Amino acid sequence: MPYYWIFPLGILSGMRTNEMAQLRCSDIKKEKGIWFMHIEDDEETRVKTVSSIRKVPVHPQLIKLGFIDYVAKMRRKRE
């Protein structure tokens, strides 16, 4: 994930820096019309505590800034 997104994600999501840095395109999902960032503990990502496993809604301002479009572009590039 390019550094451009770290600052807006941090401000608008409240996520920890390491959580943002570990985000994968597959962690961004739409459920019932709402975009979420899924924070989970698995083979590729780590969380600080069990209570850190959660779904963080994507802030509307992030969508306006093009975050979902960026994720879609990275998915097409398979990055």
Image (spheres, rainbow, N blue to C red):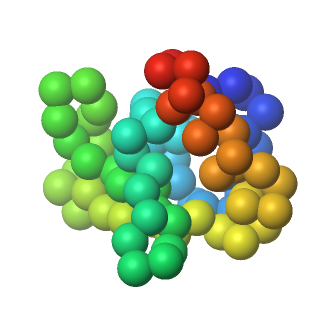
Asked whether the viewer can see residue 76, the reply is yes
Decide: is 66 above or below 24: below
**The quadrant where residue 58 appears:** bottom right
Q: Position of residue 8 (x, y in %)?
A: 76, 50
Q: Residue furthest right?
A: 65
Please tell me whether residue 43 is drawn above or below residue 42 in the rendered image: above
Identity of the residue drawn at 17% across and 35% down = 42
Residue drawn at 83 percent across, 54 percent down:
65
Q: Position of residue 33 (x, y in %)?
A: 49, 77
Total of numbered circles in the picture?
Answer: 0
Q: Residue at x 51, y 66 (%)?
A: 35
Residue at (37% x, 65% y) in the render: 55
Residue 52 visible at all: no
Query: In which quarter of the view is residue 54 placed?
Result: bottom left
Identify which residue, 61 or 34, lies in the foreground. Answer: 34
Image spot of residue 5 (x, y percent): 72, 39
Q: Which residue ends up furthest to the bottom in the rendered image? A: 32
Please indicate whether residue 46 sits to the left or right of residue 62 in the image.
left
Choose between 78 and 4: the one closer to the eye: 78
> As displayed, is residue 71 above or below residue 63?
above
Q: Residue pushed farthest front?
A: 76
Residue 20 vertical position relative to residue 10 in the rendered view, above or below: above
Left or right: 63 in relation to 65: left
Residue 55 falls left or right of residue 9: left
Query: Which quadrant does the N terminus fall into?
Result: top right
